[in-house]
Image (cartoon, rainbow, N blue to C red):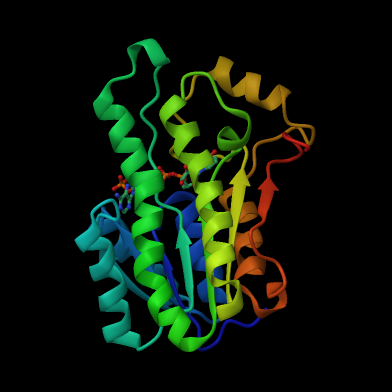
C-alpha cells in the first residue's frame, strides 16, 4: 500500500496505538504529524520515524479544544500544503461505576474521545474537500458497541464516535472522502496495563484467539482503510478484537 505524497495527522500518537499507527503510515510513505499533549513523547516518536527514513513532525495540541484542533490542521497545511488522512486516536479513560461517576469525569472523557474527533474532523474536511480525496479513521472501541460496566463515559463517547463516523461518511461520500471506525478490543498499551490481573484474565476469557492484541494489529487495519485500495469502503466499523465481538 503506497501512501507517498499523502499527509496524515494521527492524534494522541506519542505512544501506544497512535504511535504504532503513525509509524505504520510513515513506513508506507506518508508524511506524518505526531500530535499529542505530551511534547517530549511526540518529538521522540517523530525522531524515531525520521531515523528510519520516514517523514514526521510533532505538533503539540489539545484536540479537545476547538482552537487547538484548528491550529493542528492549520499548521499542517502551512507546512505541507495538504491533508489527506486524519486518524482520530487520542483517547482517555476515567473509569467508575455510574453512581460514583463525577460530572467532571464524564465531561473530560466526552470532550477528548468524542468532541475532539468532531473538532478535528470539522477542521480537516475543508482541505480534503478541495483535494477531492480524504480518509478519516476514528478509533472507537468494543466498549462503544457492547458497553462495559464502569465505563459509562467511555462507552458513550465511543458509541458516539460510531454515529459521527456514519454521518460524516454520508455527508462527504460524494467528495472522495471516506470515513470509517475501528473498534479495537483488548490491546496491550499503557491504557490497559494498570488493569488488575483478575480483570485482564476476565477479558482474555472473552477473546476467542486467546491473547491480547498489539498496537501493530490496529495499525495494520488503519493502513488498509487509509489506502487507495479501500476507496469503496465508507461508514463501516472494523472490529480488531481477536473475535471478542461477533455481530
Ligand atoms: P494511551 O497509551 O493512553 O495513548 C493515548 C494518547 O492520547 C496519549 O499519548 C495521550 O497523551 C493522548 N491524548 C490524550 N488526550 C489528548 C488530547 N486532548 N489531545 C491530544 N492527545 C491526547 O492509549 P491507547 O491504548 O494507545 O489508546 C489509543 C486509542 O485507542 C484511544 O482512543 C483508546 O480509547 C482506543 N482503544 C484502546 C484500547 C486498548 O485496549 N488499549 C481498546 C479500544 C480502544 P498524554 O499521555 O499526554 O495524556
Q: Is residue 120 visible?
A: yes
Determine the residue located farthest toward the top in the rendered image: 99
Residue sitting nearer the eye, 95 or 69:
69
Residue 30 location, x and y as percent? Answer: 50, 79
For image coordinates 59% across by 54% down, the residue present is 181
Residue 163 location, x and y as percent? Answer: 54, 48
Residue 70 location, x and y as percent? Answer: 26, 67
For image coordinates 40% across by 51% down, the residue present is 90
Q: Quadrant of the C terminus?
A: top right
Q: Is residue 54 visible?
A: no
Residue 159 vertical position relative to residue 172 in the rendered view, above or below: above
Left or right placement of residue 230 versus residue 190 in this view? right
Splitting the image into 4 quarters, where does residue 147 fall?
top right
Splitting the image into 4 quarters, where does residue 126 fall?
bottom left
Residue sitting nearer the eye, 184 or 132:
132
Left or right placement of residue 9 versus residue 224 in this view? left
Q: How many numbered discs?
A: 0
Left or right placement of residue 181 versus residue 15 in this view? right
Q: Quadrant of the N terminus?
A: bottom right
Residue 242 vertical position relative to residue 57 in the rendered view, above or below: above
For image coordinates 29% across by 34% down, the residue present is 107
Residue 225 location, x and y as percent? Answer: 64, 66
For image coordinates 26% across by 53% down, the residue present is 38
Amino acid at each position: 500500500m503506497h501512501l507517498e505524497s499523502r499527509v496524515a495527522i494521527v492524534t494522541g500518537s506519542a505512544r501506544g496505538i497512535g504511535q504504532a499507527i503513525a509509524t505504520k503510515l510513515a513506513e508506507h510513505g506518508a508524511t506524518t504529524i505526531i500530535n499529542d499533549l505530551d511534547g517530549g513523547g511526540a518529538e521522540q516518536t517523530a525522531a524515531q520515524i525520521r531515523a528510519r527514513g520516514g517523514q514526521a513532525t510533532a505538533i503539540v495540541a489539545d484536540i479537545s479544544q476547538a482552537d487547538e484542533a484548528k491550529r493542528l490542521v492549520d499548521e499542517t497545511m502551512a507546512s505541507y500544503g495538504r491533508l489527506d488522512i486524519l486518524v482520530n486516536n487520542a483517547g482517555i479513560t476515567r473509569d467508575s461505576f455510574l453512581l460514583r461517576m463525577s460530572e467532571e469525569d464524564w465531561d473530560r472523557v466526552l470532550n477528548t474521545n468524542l468532541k475532539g474527533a468532531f473538532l478535528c474532523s470539522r477542521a480537516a474536511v475543508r482541505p480534503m474537500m478541495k483535494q477531492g480525496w480524504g480518509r478519516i479513521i476514528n478509533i472507537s472501541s468494543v466498549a462503544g458497541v457492547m458497553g462495559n460496566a464502569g465505563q459509562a463515559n467511555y462507552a458513550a463517547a465511543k458509541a458516539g464516535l460510531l454515529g459521527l463516523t456514519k454521518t460524516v461518511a454520508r455527508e462527504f461520500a460524494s467528495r472522495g472522502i471516506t470515513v470509517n471506525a475501528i473498534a479495537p478490543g483488548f490491546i496491550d498499551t499503557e491504557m490497559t496495563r494498570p488493569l488488575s490481573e483478575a480483570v485482564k484474565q476476565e477479558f482474555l476469557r472473552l477473546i476467542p484467539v486467546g491473547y491480547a492484541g498489539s498496537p501493530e494489529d490496529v495499525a495494520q487495519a488503519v493502513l488498509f482503510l487509509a489506502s487507495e485500495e479501500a476507496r469503496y469502503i465508507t461508514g463501516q466499523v472494523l472490529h480488531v478484537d481477536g473475535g471478542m465481538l461477533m455481530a
